[in-house]
Image (cartoon, rainbow, N blue to C red):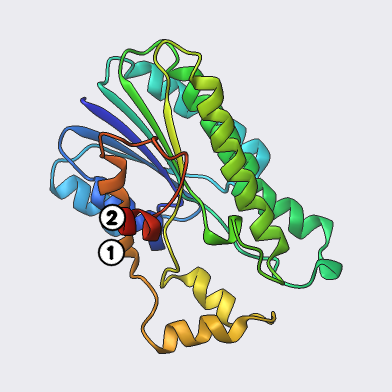
Amino acid sequence: MREIAIVTGASRGLGAAIAERLLAPDRLLVCVARSGNDPLVARAREGGVAIDYRRCDLADAQATDVLAAALAGLLREHRDAQRFVLVNNAGVVEPIGSIETLRTDALASLLQVNLASLMRLTAAFLEATDDAAGERRILSISSGAARHPIAGWAAYCASKAAVDMFTRCIVDEQSRRPNPARACALAPGVLDTRMQQTIRSADFPSIERFRQLKAQGGLIAPEDAAARIVAYLDRDDFGAHPLDDLREHAARG
């Protein structure tokens, strides 16, 4: 197998679209999601593409630990692959509301999915491939909300800002290794996904901006974003910008 690619949050939305783009005969595609994605699995099998679909609720810390160990074992089994890829896509936006309304259980769930599980799976990925000769790439889906505060989104903004800093720490640590992994936290723009439906039904000061984006056709289709993300992932200079935004990248050319 030339490549192993792991994608989290692969059951729907952007994650499903990225997984679809990564289906290839010379790649083992490992998908992680809370729910299934039967059409993706069927297309993979019909095309003779190797796929390993794993159901896991990343809001469950214990289940995430079990998953991390299993993925590490799988990576070691294929340690001769030419390239190893991890796409940290899974994420949730709730709780939405003023800071005064935030409660521990909702915060803990969001931070477990958006940050703790991402860090745990990344750690397992790096440890399992540390002595591999193949190239290693880690792409974490960030957000413009990581870099620009949005009233009512304190939990989501903070979690994505933490993903950005975690990515910078990966780059700093890996720069000292003989075969450093490359990493990037990439903001994809505002997507037309179920998360946006949740946002438009919430109550926060800038809600009308998001409703207008939908009404005016300003949202990006997940399939279009996935095509650009996978192309970005394949670039020779991947990792040159540890923090990047697809919109700014397009402007740079």
Please give the name of the residue rendered at 45% of the width and 29% of the height, measured from the top-left corner. Answer: 71
Q: Relative to residue 26, is residue 248 depicted above or below? A: below
Element at label 2: helix
Element at label 1: helix
Please give the name of the residue rendered at 33% of the width and 70% of the height, measured from the top-left corner. Answer: 221
Which residue is label 2 attached to?
228
Q: Relative to residue 250, is residue 239 depicted above or below? A: above
Q: Please state if 71 lies on the left or on the right of 22 as rendered.
A: right
Rendered image quadrant of residue 23: top left
Rendered image quadrant of residue 118: top right
Is disc 1 surrounded by few (<14), some (14 to 19) or many (20+) residues within 10 Å? few
Rendered image quadrant of residue 74: top left
Which amino acid, mark 2? Arg
Q: Residue 111 appears at what percent x and percent y?
A: 68, 49
Q: Relative to residue 214, is residue 234 depicted above or below? A: above
Q: Residue 82 appears at what percent x and percent y?
A: 25, 21
Which residue is label 1 attached to?
224
Q: Nearer the viewer, residue 179 or 107?
A: 179
Q: Nearer the viewer, residue 26 or 84?
A: 84
Q: CA distance from mark 1 to mark 2?
A: 7 Å
The N terminus lies in quadrant: top left
